[in-house]
Image (cartoon, rainbow, N blue to C red):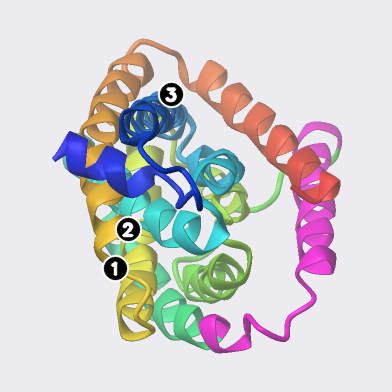
Amino acid sequence: MARRAAAAAAPARPGAGGRAGRRGTHALSTLLVASAAAFLLAVLSAVTGFGGGVLLLPVFTALFGLRVAVPVLTLTQLASNAARVWLNRRELHAALARRFALGAVPFALAGALLLAHAPLAALKRLLGVFLLGVVAWRRLGRPPGRPGARTFVAVGAASGLGSALLGSVGPLTAPFFLAYGLTRAAYVGTEAAAALTLHLAKTAGYAGAGLLGRQVLLLGAALTPATLAGAWVGRRIVGRISDRTFVALVEAGLVAAALLFLAGR
């Protein structure tokens, strides 16, 4: 499987002639870099509940090209979120995840249809400003009130639309889950369950559009072990930190994500 995925990862090189061995070595090194990135960012996602998709997309785009990177990223996020759901299943709030899914699924499909016409650069910068404002409000102003469960239908709708357009908007949901009072395992597991429904809807859309070809499926399968290992390591870390430290880590992640959005990456 790893050898096939490595071959699939290699971009075509006209005139390469008899350099199959060199291409194979290059493909294997590309797969190893992708696996290392998937592992490290799965650890980050398992600790903060988000961040892996935002940071993995530019890495995968550089390695595989955007047309392959987006569906491969979705497959790795499926594996990462499913692992986080299982590892935190005793603490997650299933009712919140269900309400999130009510808004996320239809708007993720709608966002896929709008992708060709939406002003993506402007949307990314708007999201970056929003995230910085949320962190500043939490730190300098009056803490936001606890949102009702019905609020998460709207949060899911915004996340579904944004994820379909921007690739990953995990940071968008974090302030709402924090304001609801979720921390550590409850936060990570609930956010992962919510995101899982979103990525399943996106995967169905990519399959319908013919984007889940052999190369994408092989890469997704080859990167899954690293993603699952990262989720397990991150779960161990979460169990060893305090609620206060956890919230600080999440807020630091929000600031980093905001800066990436504002930078247009």
Residue extending furthest left?
1
Q: Tell me the element at label 2.
A: helix
Front residue (pair 149, 173): 173
Say if 217 sits above or below 158 in the image. above
Foreground mark, 2 or 3, reads 2
Confirm whether residue 142 shows in the render.
no
In this picture, residue 43 sits left or right of residue 157: left
Q: CA distance from mark 1 to mark 3?
A: 26 Å
What number is the disc on residue 39?
none
Q: CA distance from mark 1 to mark 2?
A: 5 Å
Give how far across and how far down residue 51 sits, in percent.
54, 39
Queried whether the magenta region covers residue 192, the answer comes back as no
Queried whether the magenta region covers residue 131, the answer comes back as yes
Q: Going 31% across and 26% down the picture, which residue do you hit? A: 230
Q: Going 20% across and 33% down the picture, which residue do you hit? A: 225
Q: Tell me the element at label 1.
A: loop
Residue type pointed to by label 1:
Gly
Front residue (pair 92, 44): 44
Q: Which residues are magenta?
A: 111-140
Q: Which residue is mark 2?
A: 216
In this picture, residue 107 sits left or right of residue 206: right
Q: Which residue is mark 3?
A: 40
Front residue (pair 37, 164): 37
Q: Which residue is mark 1?
A: 213
**Do labels 1 and 3 touch, CB within 8 Å?**
no
Q: Quick one: label 3, few (<14), some, or many (20+) residues within 10 Å?
A: many
Say if 107 sits above or below 78 in the image. below
| Mark closer to the chain start, 2 or 3 | 3
Give how far across and how far down residue 207 sits, in percent.
30, 78
Q: Going 54% across and 51% down the picture, which residue do you hit? A: 170
**Do labels 1 and 2 touch, CB within 8 Å?**
yes
Front residue (pair 108, 86): 108
